[in-house]
Image (spheres, grey):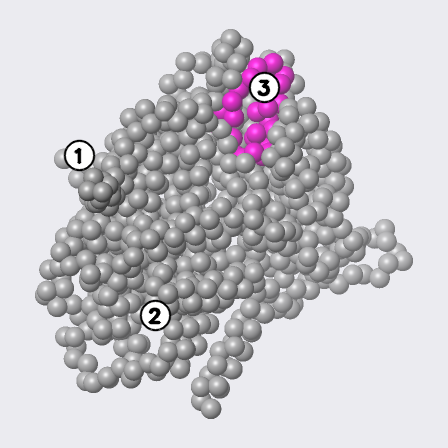
């Protein structure tokens, strides 16, 4: 009898614990003020409880860091706490797919990164994310750079291009994964400079950087946050920026006549079909967070520049970004490469 | 000596109330994180990151570092007591640690584990203090081809970890490698064996697998097999602690483990886990009583626990001197640095000496705290085993399930836990042991990724890969080892064919 009782108790405890996985604690909160231009709609009582923020990457990465800083400012601008839920795996797909299954009541949001817009093009994802998610805010954008080791023979980007033209396929560049934004950017650069380089895929930007520092690859196409400190301390040399933004005295590819302007973007989204009033409140809330000077400086200290776009502009931006991605991915042959591997 | 003076300055930085408190808080949180399976170091650090924004930079880093190496102390507790690894790096401790506990030597195992961790952690720190820049430059020389070579060597060395039947071990290693191919492949972005299940895209999570094949396996054993009443006589205080003999036998493995862990920790990858496996294998091969392994050999606890602590000290080296995090907790430490406006790298030591040396000094102090913290509790933990199984096992079950869920917030992982656990229970009845499966799982992806990237770098030419000095010599060594293992059987076959 005792044994059966203990087993039942244990099972009950397990179930209660797993049920407590999503926080459902009601919060006494500030009822947000409604915009005066909506006279006929009844005010929506949102938010009244914590919002879940799904990060489809593991704790510690840049998406996660950004999420935690946002969560810190959420009580100030949205009146409730945000609970981060890390669901890593599959280059972000596992978490996004799981998020897609959450209730569309506006109490869950997710990271909306470049990956979200890029992955579905390869036809390997469950859903086309920009069709089922509603953009709320673009928070940061991170420029992309072309870096070589300190002892590389190339001092300028022209020298690199010259060498590459004379020795097609000999230069090896590292990136953060097949089909990733850095891979796509590198191929776009190769296309516009009319050169051929060999790509070496890595699991993360960090792994590629390690290989670059050891001299195992010739070039690393990386997000600026990864290589800037190394460029400043001299262990790495950034030859050019793939984003049309001036960083120190590093030339941009655009200024050299190459039409390459790509960047890593990180934002936030919720589900399509959520009450537009709620979207408006989230939009206002994030506008507050992203324009808060302390928030901006905290993100800056993490190496991320705030480049805020509100819900409507972010939506437009995503559509434009998707078109550019589709063009580049096809023209550079990456789409073909991924599709042929599927067979 | 210049370095010693700077270290002394570091201690001066350390001895303020905030920093000491941060150190203590960090190591306690770390130990708890280590003891509880599933709740990882990285998760704990990520949770505390926003709180650290308001703290002074050095103080915050002292706390985070404390969490990291603290976990390496705590991880062995549940491994020894209930055959449930608290951290991936403590999987190997289950093998002999739990056996020691079953023989009533739980206290000894826990104590030796703490002592070994302390010695290794401190020696590792000495290496960090004096050799950091040199070691990191050496570490960079290892690229994908070298990682492949080391993983192959690891496979050769670690295959026959347990059990008497090498063939069965090899089969389990192969199953482990097969399991490592499931998921979204790093190099090609292809999904393999996911069967349309989204959660399988991330592949089999090592922590969950370890909990299943060790912990759940143990659970079923206890459930389904009649347990003899453990004679609970008056347990003398002396019996809770290691005997002189056990201590004497532990010192050489601890030193060897430190060396092994330190070098493996300098490289990217699951350093703690790999170094503990490597140490166990070395101890087993060197031992004059190899048959004791798997049944409570104290060397099998001392060596691996030292190794994983040395590895955590060594991971700090590429982090602090190059700004390169080779393990997820190191990545969070890096974030901690950046948040406070400091970028680790070659200039860290010169531009922010007080932060660097304060951190290093705090790690020495933290190790001492941990020893003081863990040793007295050995008795408390060991006597937990006196709890009757029908109360202890449900608690362990709850902890296992919570831990597995906490890893990825996924119910799927719980299903996986059960299925793998049942599978492990049944085949272990047929004499297949689980440790080689764990080895295969850990090494499988490194071997594949290293080989593919290595071949790309070497222009598709395997000979070119072998002609790289480091990779080539490691691979040659591995081949020699394989040949030696097969030398006797080959000789026999040759002799037989001569006679006939």
Pointers 3 and 1 in contact (CB under 8 A)? Answer: no
- Give the residue pinned by disc 3: A190
- The secondary element bearing badge 1 is classed as helix
Image position of B324 with respect to B358: above or below: above
Residue A255: percent from the left, percent from the top?
61, 15
The label on residue B2 is 1
Q: Badge 1: few (under 14), some or many (20 or more) residues near its Cα, within 10 Å?
A: few
The label on residue B326 is none
Front label number (2 vs 1): 2
Picture residue at 36% right of the left edge, 24% below the top: B463
Position of residue B60 in the picture relative to residue B308 (left or right): right
Q: Is residue B145 magenta?
A: no
Chain letter for mark 1: B
Residue B142: percent from the left, percent from the top?
34, 32
- The secondary element bearing badge 2 is classed as helix
User: What residue range appears in magenta?
Assistant: A173-199
Residue B358: percent from the left, percent from the top?
28, 45
- Please tell me if label 2 and label 1 are on a single chain: yes
- Give the residue pinned by disc 2: B82
- Please tell me if label 3 and label 1 are on a single chain: no
Picture residue at 57% right of the left edge, 65% below the top: A21
Mark positioned earlier in the residue sequence (2 or 1): 1
Of the pair A329 and A69, the residue shown nearer to us: A329
Chain letter for mark 2: B
Q: CA distance from mark 2 to mark 1?
A: 47 Å
Chain letter for mark 3: A
Q: Residue B460 appears in which quarter of the rendering?
A: top left
Position of residue B407 in the picture relative to residue B245 (left or right): right
- Quadrant showing the N terminus of chain B: top left
């Amino acid at each position: 009898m005792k044994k059966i009782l203990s087993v039942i108790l244990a099972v009950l405890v397990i179930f209660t614990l797993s049920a407590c996985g999503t926080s459902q604690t009601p919060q006494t909160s500030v009822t947000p003020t409604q915009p005066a231009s909506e006279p006929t709609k009844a005010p929506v009582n949102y938010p009244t409880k914590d919002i879940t923020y799904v990060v489809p990457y593991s704790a510690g990465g840049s998406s996660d860091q950004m999420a935690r800083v946002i969560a810190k400012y959420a009580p100030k601008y949205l009146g409730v706490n945000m609970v981060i839920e890390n669901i890593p795996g599959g280059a972000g797909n596992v978490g996004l797919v799981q998020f897609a299954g959450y209730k569309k009541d506006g109490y869950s949001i997710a990271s909306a990164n470049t990956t979200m817009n890029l992955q579905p093009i390869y036809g390997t994802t469950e859903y086309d994310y920009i069709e089922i998610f509603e953009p709320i805010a673009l928070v940061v954008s991170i420029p992309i750079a072309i870096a070589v080791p300190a002892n590389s023979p190339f001092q300028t980007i022209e020298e690199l291009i010259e060498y590459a033209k004379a020795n097609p396929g000999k230069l090896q560049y590292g990136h953060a994964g097949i089909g990733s934004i850095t891979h796509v950017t590198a191929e776009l650069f190769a296309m516009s400079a009319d050169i051929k380089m060999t790509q070496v895929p890595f699991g993360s930007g960090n792994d590629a950087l390690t290989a670059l520092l050891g001299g195992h690859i010739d070039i690393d196409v990386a997000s600026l946050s990864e290589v800037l400190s190394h460029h400043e301390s001299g262990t790495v040399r950034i030859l050019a920026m793939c984003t049309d933004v001036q960083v120190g005295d590093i030339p941009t590819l655009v200024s050299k006549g190459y039409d390459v302007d790509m960047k890593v973007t990180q934002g936030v989204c919720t589900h399509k079909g959520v009450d537009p009033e709620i979207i408006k409140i989230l939009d206002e809330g994030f506008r507050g967070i992203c324009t808060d000077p302390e928030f901006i400086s905290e993100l800056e200290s993490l190496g991320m520049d705030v480049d805020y776009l509100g819900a409507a502009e972010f939506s437009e931006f995503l559509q434009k970004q998707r078109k550019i991605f589709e063009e580049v991915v096809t023209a550079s042959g990456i789409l073909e490469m991924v599709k042929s591997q599927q067979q | 000596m210049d370095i010693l003076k700077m270290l002394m300055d570091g201690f001066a930085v350390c001895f303020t109330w905030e920093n000491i408190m941060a150190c203590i808080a960090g190591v306690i949180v770390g130990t708890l994180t280590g003891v509880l399976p599933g709740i990882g170091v990285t998760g704990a650090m990520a949770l505390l990151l926003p709180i650290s924004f308001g703290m002074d930079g050095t103080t915050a880093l002292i706390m985070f570092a404390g969490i990291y190496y603290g976990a390496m102390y705590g991880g062995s507790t549940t491994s020894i007591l209930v055959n449930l690894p608290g951290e991936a790096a403590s999987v190997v401790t289950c093998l002999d640690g739990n056996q020691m506990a079953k023989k009533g030597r739980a206290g000894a195992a826990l104590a030796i584990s703490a002592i070994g961790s302390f010695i290794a952690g401190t020696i590792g720190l000495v290496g960090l203090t004096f050799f950091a820049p040199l070691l990191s430059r050496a570490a960079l020389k290892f690229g994908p081809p070298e990682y492949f070579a080391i993983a192959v060597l690891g496979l050769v060395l670690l295959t026959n970890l347990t059990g008497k039947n090498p063939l069965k071990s090899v089969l389990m290693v192969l199953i482990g490698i097969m399991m490592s191919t499931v998921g979204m492949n790093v190099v090609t972005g292809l999904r393999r064996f996911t069967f349309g299940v989204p959660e399988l895209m991330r592949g089999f999570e090592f922590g969950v697998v370890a909990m299943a094949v060790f912990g759940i396996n143990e659970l079923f054993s206890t459930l389904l097999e009649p347990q003899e009443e453990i004679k609970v006589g008056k347990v003398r205080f002396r019996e809770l602690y290691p005997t002189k003999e056990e201590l004497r036998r532990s010192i050489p493995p601890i030193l060897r483990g430190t060396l092994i862990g330190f070098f493996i920790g300098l490289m990217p990858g699951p350093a703690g886990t790999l170094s503990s496996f490597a140490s166990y294998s070395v101890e087993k091969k060197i031992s004059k009583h190899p048959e004791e392994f798997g049944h409570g050999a104290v060397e099998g606890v001392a060596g691996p626990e030292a190794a994983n602590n040395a590895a955590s000290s060594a991971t700090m080296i590429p982090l602090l001197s190059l700004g390169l995090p080779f393990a997820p907790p190191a990545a969070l430490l890096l974030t901690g640095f950046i948040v406070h406006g400091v970028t680790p790298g070659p200039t860290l030591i010169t531009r922010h000496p007080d932060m660097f040396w304060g951190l290093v000094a705090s790690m020495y102090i933290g190790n001492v705290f941990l020893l003081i913290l863990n040793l007295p509790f050995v008795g408390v933990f060991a006597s937990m085993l006196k709890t009757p199984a029908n109360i202890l096992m449900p608690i362990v079950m709850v902890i296992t399930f919570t831990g597995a869920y906490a890893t990825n917030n996924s119910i799927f992982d719980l299903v996986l836990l059960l299925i793998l656990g049942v599978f492990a229970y049944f085949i272990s009845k047929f004499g297949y042991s689980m440790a080689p499966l764990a080895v295969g799982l850990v090494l499988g992806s490194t071997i594949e990724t290293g080989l593919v990237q290595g071949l790309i770098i070497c222009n598709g030419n395997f000979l070119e890969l072998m002609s790289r000095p480091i990779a080539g010599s490691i691979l040659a060594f591995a081949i020699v080892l394989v040949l030696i293992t097969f030398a006797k059987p080959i000789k026999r076959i040759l002799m037989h064919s001569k006679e006939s």
